Amino acid sequence: RGDHPGGDRDVFGREYMALCARLITFPIPTVAAVNGHAFGAGFMVALCHDLRIMREDRGYLCANEVEIGMTIPEPELALFRHKIPIGAFHETVVLARRWTGPAAKEAGFVHATSSLEDVRPVALQTAERQLGVAKNRDVLGWMKERLYGERAAINESHGAAHMLRNPAEFSRAQRVER
């Protein structure tokens, strides 16, 4: 069982990782509308989408495991490595940087920012612009699987989706005692 009386962390982790694997390889373009903070698992789910729209005036994207004394599991590291440019990857993972929308856009892993009122409409407009790609679901699904699946073409070993589908094969997050 997990540390919290509300449920089993291991079961949640497996199911959440499977959800992320499904999102990252979903055979149509996906757009995340981030209207506030996205830490840890929220940051992961945003990165699993093809495009991210974030509020311009408030909210952070952050992988704060190092601040709370936990290691980042390999599937999550693979996701970050595939979706975040290398300079920003280091700041995200090692320094636990809290990325604002404008800073994340400048770093290259948020595609647009807007006011709170416009996050959803901008995300919908962004999705509508992807309709040409969406009609080729078989091809897009195949391409995403090659990018993020087992024996991923852009990876030395396995892609983020394969690791997310098979978390038991890879290192688990651990709390590091001080």
Image (cartoon, rainbow, N blue to C red):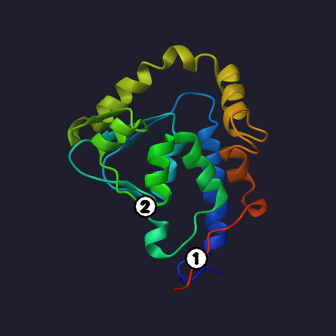
| Residue 59, x across and y down, in percent | 28, 53
Residue at the spot 29% in from the left edge and 37% down from the top edge: 119
Residue at the spot 23% in from the left edge and 51% down from the top edge: 58
Q: Amino acid at mark 1?
A: Gly
On the image, which quarter does residue 146 sit in? top right
Q: Is residue 67 left or right of residue 74?
A: left
Q: Is residue 38 above or below residue 86?
A: below
Residue at the spot 21% in from the left edge and 39% down from the top edge: 115
Q: Is residue 69 above or below residue 54?
A: below
Q: Is residue 52 above or below residue 3?
A: above
Q: Which residue is mark 2?
A: 95
N-term-proximal mark, 2 vs 1? 1
Q: Amino acid at mark 2?
A: Leu
Q: Give 144 or 63, whichever is nearer the viewer.
A: 63
Q: Give 159 or 48, whichever is nearer the viewer.
A: 159
Residue at the spot 53% in from the left edge and 82% down from the top edge: 4
Q: Quadrant of the N terminus?
A: bottom right
Which mark, residue 7? 1
Q: Residues within 10 Å of mark 1 (few under 14, many from 20)?
A: few
Q: Give 173 or 42, whichever is nearer the viewer.
A: 173
| Residue 147, x across and y down, in percent | 67, 33
| Residue 25, x across and y down, in percent | 64, 37
Gap between marks 2 and 1, in whole Å? 30 Å
Residue 127: in sight, yes or no?
yes
Q: Secondary structure at mark 1?
A: loop
